[in-house]
Amino acid sequence: MSFVSTQTSTSRVGRYVGRALALTLAAGALATTQLTGTAYAADAVSGAQTAGDSLFPNQGNGGYDVSHYDIKLKADFVTATANAAVGTSTVATTTTIDAATTGAPLSSYSLDFQGSTGNLAASTYDVDTVTVNGAPATFTRIEASSTTAATADNHKLIITPATPVEGSFTTVVTAHGAPVIHFDTDGSAEGWNNTTDGATFVNQPVGSMTLFPNNNTPRDKATYTVSVDVPSTLKTSNYANAGGKPYPSAVAGNGELVSKTPNDDGSRTTWVWNETKQMASELSMISIGRYDVYESDITLASGRVLHEWSFIDPAISVANQNTTQVSRSQFKSLLDFYESKYGPYPGNSTGVVTDVVPSTINYALETQDRPFFPNSAGGSFYHEIMHQWWGDNVSPTDWNDITLNEGPATYAPYQFAFESSGTSNTTTEQAVYATWNSASPTSSTFTIAGAAMTNGNQLFGQQVYAKGAMSLEALRTAIGAADFETLMRQYQLTYGGGQISGRRTAAFEALAESISGRDLTAFFQSWWFSNTKPAWQVKFNLNVAGPTTQVNPGDALTYTLSARNTGKIAMPAGGTVITLDVGDVLDDATIGTLPANVTLDGSTLTWSVPATALAATATVDVPFTAVAATTGKTLKAVARASTLGGTCLSCTATTVVGNAPISPAPVPTITGGTPTVGVPLTADTTGWADGTTFGYQWFLDGTPVPGATSATYTPASDVVGLPVTVRVTGTLAGFNPTTQTSAATAVGVRATMTTGTPTISGTPKIGQRLTVDRGTWQAGTVFTYQWRANGTNISGATGPSYVPAVASQVGQTIDVVVTGTRAGYTTASKTSAATTAVAAGDALASTPTPTFTGTPKVGVPFAPNYGSWDDGVTTTFTWQANGTNIGGATTGSFTPTATQLGQTLTVTVTGTKAGITAVTKISAGSDAVVAGTQTLQPTPTITGTPRVGTAVTGVQGTWDTGTTKTNKWYADGVEIAGATGTTYTPTVAQIGQVLTYEVTSTRSGYTTVTKTSEGKTIVGVQTLQPTPTIVGTPQVGHELTTSSTWDDGTSQAFQWYADDVAIDGAVSPWFTPGASEVGAAITVKVTSTKPDYETVSKTSDPTAPVAKGDLASTPVPTISGTAKVGRELAAVPGTWDDGVELAYQWLADGTPVDGATGTTYTPGAGKVGAVVTVAVTGTKAGYDPVTKTSEATGPVAQGDLSSTPVPTISGTPKVGATLTAHPGDWDADTELAYQWLADGTPVDGATGTTYTPGPGKVGAVVTVAVTGTKTGYDPVTKTSEATSPVAQGDLVDTPVPTITGTPKVGVALTAVPGTWDDGVELTYQWLADGTPVDGATGTTYTPGAGKVGAVVTVAVTGTKTGYDPVTRTSEATGPVAQGDLSSTPVPTITGTPKVGATLTAHPGDWDADTELAYQWLADGKPVSGATEETFEPAFGQLDAAITVRVTGTKTGYEPVSRTSNATAAVGLGDQTSTPTPAVMGTPQVGGTLSIDRGSWDDGVVFDYAWSADGQPIEGATDFFYHPSADDLGAVITVSVTGRKSGYVPVTKTSEATSAVVAGELESTPTPVISGVTKVGETLTAAPGAWDDGTDLAYQWFAGEDAIAGATGATYVVAPADLGKQLRVRVSGSKAGYVGVARSSDLTATIGLGDLVSTPTPAITGAAKVGTVLKAVTGTWDDGVTLSYQWLRGSTPISGATGSSYPLVAADAGSKITLRVTGTKTGYSPASTVSLATATVAKGKLATHPKPVIQGVAKVGRTLKVKPVKWETGVKLTYKWYAGSTPISGATKTSYKVKKAQAGKKLHVVVTATKAGYTTVSASSAATAKLKP
């Protein structure tokens, strides 16, 4: 349903007047308000009332951009009385909006604002004032609510400023009232939602307009300042939370909390939040309520510190609060990971808000900075935090962009679970693929296009969540992981924080294509814009391999392409295409026969890959032959995947013909052990040819690791379960690059996590919070918690803090197990030290008695003031009426029903706090419950107009459920007899009377309500209703008339129509059509009225279309002026009819001249010789046009050029310098030609606007002749003044030369002269220290030894005939340096790198006379004193890699140092004394075993590892070991590992012990039974404190007989136990220990139980003899048998023992009560007595037949009373009458007529009597007069 209305206001007209004006509009109409005032600028426009969103077209506005919102809000709340019901709220707001126009000035503009869920009349939140730039502004409002179509939902505040705004402007809007919820078309809701303790304001997609006016579109983001003034404490209708007592309030918002200021008396507090980041209005959030506020500082891995503000409603359950606290503890790990993937966290703070909310907003939402969650920040925590990047930092520009919100937010949690937290072993790819694989193609996930939705109710479907995530993983597969991660980060960096003009999806696609270099149009079409299930993207590794041996001219060679399927689906045949560019191969080789599926196009090979199974590899070999004479030529082939999904392993293969591969080039090895997360691996290339340089690529399971291209590689978490290889490519001058790939390692394993030791802070006491400090763990670890009491897990205690809450924990110790997980690391758990014993909690301090105020009323929630219980108390409730429990009334409020009418209410409140004795308080009685007021009391309506003879219907309206309605009709206020239905047919007599309809509603327990409709006058129906006719010709200017005959006394009104549109003012019986009616059919509607009769309208048949009229005065035009090119001619039209508009067309030789349609015309050159005419066409609305043409002019003559200036010359007259001709301003369209002259002689070819004199023109003067020609005009030539004589020229390009090469003895230097003028000849002279070097006149010069230290320059001289020579000298080089040694080999080392072993340096062959020096290094650092050719590593070099540096020196040469390759790490020594240990002690569960190590070398330290049956025991690494239950029956060994610095560790294992035997429990106390020993009562077994870890089982006994099924710690005494004594046996069992059973003492003898629910019965039925009374027993305990005894007064009525009782005569005058007795086996019987009925009245006989006389009414004849049947027990008497006189003795059923009665009429009176009933008499009809 849609409601539309508007509100209009000005600064001086109150909003109420404005509303009244608006309400006069028809329903559904949109108001347009025109206000007089200052004239606005001509270019000012009205701003658009839409932002153009595809799904929400009425949201957002145009013409301006908002930069900042300042919102001041004061809120007040009324807590609901009904339990857990939402309250109500009122607000007063001032919204200041800073904005700027984006185009033309705005005469008006709109904001989105909603104050109603219906129309404007229903608005509860109204605008008070609007100012623009400080001046009052007028405004109107639109309120059109729709929950079925977003296209119909429209809420606007339209503002007209006093003067138009341009540039920056400020709008201030004040409003007050009760904000509303916004309901979406998908059934969800947002906006302002009242809660049990305040309100929460969340807004996706469009709810923000329910609180503050704004530009409600995510494409207009702004900053915000929000100030909220609220009561400092708030109550809640969630009475279970400490009775709903007042609690400190808080306000959660976006951005950062800048202040929190109480007022003077502390009763109110103002919270100010400042959001300095750009934010869309849909992300705004305000939550006001009872909150616990948590703050912390989070230091991210980047070093940035974020402040956290989080808010938790204290009414949330402990379990849900724990969930939120766990999520809070993961903030750092989560944000660090997301920053690594998506860039810096966009906000300046973080946090969460968790609130108890109504079902309307029972969803989580990505409100900016701190997401909102209902009840707990649990399952969607990772999702909503990711939205801070995707959805908040980058917001949609159109709501069809939401797939870029929800897709990444759904995708990222998969990443976090596998790649960071380690909580999942399923890869992101596998997890997302599984969702795709399991989703049905017919589900909305695929049948709705996620970026092309057509309806707002589709916004939050799986097509944007699940499919959005699928599309990202498919994209990652399509373009590769590296490009994908770059895209996701770069998109945030490029677009974060601001907005763009186009679709977000388009920008994302464009950036993806830019980064990947791929056309992704088809990809995004299938994933975002189609409504079918896309195929999953294939994934493969691509490789090209060229020749691996030397290729010589004429040799055959092969290039091998391969594609390995690394994806999730088989690669279909032909679905994958790979190209190979062989252009650099075909230059020097020929191709052989192409294999199947390979084609050649030019120099590109295309391979259509055959079908390839998962993990399979397809290959193809392409043959070539090197051609002759190609030695030294490079063959290069480049592969590329043409289709998506390919990752290059090696996509370029290069071979130089005639070059051999590098040799030796052994397969590299990987050092570093088993690949372990975080532990570096190194590629060892030992053995390759000297001088080889290397490139590296590391692989996981054959797929390249992005960025892993150095000699070392540190595996990340993705190594787990996968083997590692490294590909090494060596390059060496003169050789072909050579590639070798290592063998695969073992699969990668997890690293051992670094763990901290958790510690507990806080006092171990019932009700006191304990908090764990985790200690320092591996960075990025995610934690879970389990608190324990005496080593036993506490159910639900899984947060970072715990409050002891169970009485049995008193005396127990508390510890906590902290478990850390991180991707790539073993999960680790650490247990804190136990606390001291838990102390008993303090008794409840504040336990108020509830007090009632007010009177309880049927149907109205009623609740007392529960007072202020202690924090953390849970309150439960039981309500009573007249002292009896009310079934099901167990919440904080109670709504009385008719059953409680007149009764007094009490409520019992029990306050419980975990581990503390409960307290119960009972209120005093309330006032008696009074009758309720019916809620729905609609005023009935009458449909249609009441017409005589036609039934009219009354509409009762919607009343409360359970009501009974009766109807009455009235005419002029007088009840119409018998008119008691919902329809009534008026009569003729009622014409003119007012008809009303009355509905009376009754409901048990409620006051009766009567409502009467508005009156409607009953009308008659006219008899004559003729259809009118039209007389006259339908033509402009011709009159039409109409006539018809109607009833006498009627009056007629007329309205003429043209094509069914009413003609303004045409309301007479006649009408003359005008021009606007041409072509229209004319009708007339006649409306007949008569007092008290129904108005009748009749419309004529239409006329033929109205024809046009004819013009009268149409003169022939004339032309004035001379017909010559360039001269203006003028048309003289003559005098036409008034109102005629004239159009002109000039013609040349009878042909219309294009564009010549004015009153004047100037002939152009093309019209020379033509005659000119002008045609004038007259038009007038409603008349046929007429055209008249003038007489022709004479032929058009040629024109004269008017502007022919003398040209001028600019520039210097010099050889090589350019002269320019300036012709001046000639007539338009004149074409100019140029001729340059030297000494008056034309220069050949010099016909342009410029001229450059050559050497032959030196001394000549130059002129230029310009000739102007124009079609239709005579040509004109003008010649310039002469220049001065032409002078000689200068060379132009004379660059300073440069020198290339190194200034070094023996190294050639080269002169680079630069580019001189064409034709210049160059000569060179080299100089040393400025002195020319003899003979050094070439372009190169090689310094000799004698030039060491000199600087070199070169002088270049340029000469050209006719030009002055120019010399330029270069900059000097640096001083000439000494030479370089030529042979400086890299040394090598021989020997084993081990402590004490000798290593020898081999320097190689250096230049003769070179002196060598040595320096040995360990891990690159010089070893002091190690300067000989040999070196023995010492202990200090253990694990170091050894190198040797050799330095060669020679006189006159630069010294050179060369360093060898490093050796392997220096190895350890060997230990000598390593004895076998022995196990000491008895192998028994719970016992202690120790170790006899034996005697080891001095200085050895030890590690221990205990094993059971040869399997290591987790955590058993101490000198002592206590066997556990898991070890029962196993033999124990211990391994001792001896470690000594510099030595290889040695491990020795002991002999096994005998098998471990069971232990014995130590603490096995006797149980104790507590509780009342009666049937139905609960007995509780207190087992005592058994050994930690003991499992207890219970069995209850009656005497010595076990009670079947009684195996719990509590037992409800059964009737069968009556008279018996009970006991309980507790059996303790603990794995690995001998079981023990202990029995309690016997209880006292079990007595009868007490029934609990014994309600007072009630009696229904009227207290009248003959009526059946019925018992209403209420709800007794299950299994109770009820018996009944009815009492007359206080005396039992014999035999009246049923659930109903028929009142008899004996009951008349008495009051009846009912005693109900409940009995149940094992329980004492209970009786309750009802209230007495009213005094029993006599009954009323139901059958009252009228007696009938049978027989002939004649003297002597016998008349009889016709027998009829009366009720049973009725006694009849008879009395006959003659006239009015009784006939003596005539008292029987018959009577014989006497003469005395002749001429009289007889009748008989029958009297009926029955005990207990009112006597009834009935008279027959009189007979006819008796005949004699």
Image (tube, rainbow, N blue to C red):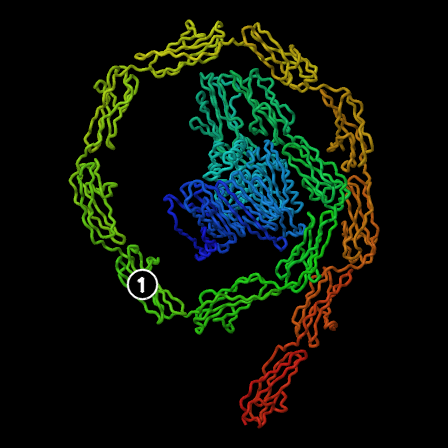
Is residue 613 at all visible to an observer of this figure? no
Is residue 1555 at all visible to an observer of this figure? yes
Say what secondary structure mark 1 lies in: loop
Q: Nearer the viewer, residue 1152 or 1409?
A: 1152
The residue at 82%/43% (across/down) is 1564
Q: In which quarter of the image is the C terminus?
A: bottom right
- Report the residue that reaches farthest toward the front: 264
Q: Which of 1764 and 1188 is in front in this view?
A: 1188
Residue ID for mark 1: 1068
> Could you say where residue 1398 lies in the image, as x and y percent from the top left?
68, 13
Image mark count: 1
> Could you say where residue 638 lies in the image, as x and y percent from the top left?
48, 26
- Residue 1381 vs 862, above or below: the answer is above
Q: Nearer the viewer, residue 890 or 703?
A: 890
Q: Is residue 283 left or right of residue 1256?
A: right
Q: What residue type is labelled 1?
A: Ser
- Residue 1526 vs 1218, above or below: the answer is below
- Residue 1724 vs 593, above or below: the answer is below
> Could you say where residue 825 lies in the image, as x and y percent from the top left?
65, 32
- Report the residue that reaches farthest toward the left: 1194
Q: In this view, does 1390 lie to the left or right of 1503?
A: left
> Could you say where residue 584 lies in the image, as x and y percent from the top left?
45, 22
10 Å neighbourhood of mark 1: few (<14), some, or many (≥20)?
Answer: some
- Say which quarter of the image contains residue 761: top right
Q: Is residue 1321 left or right of residue 304?
A: left
- Say which quarter of the image contains residue 744: top right
The residue at 42%/45% (across/down) is 47
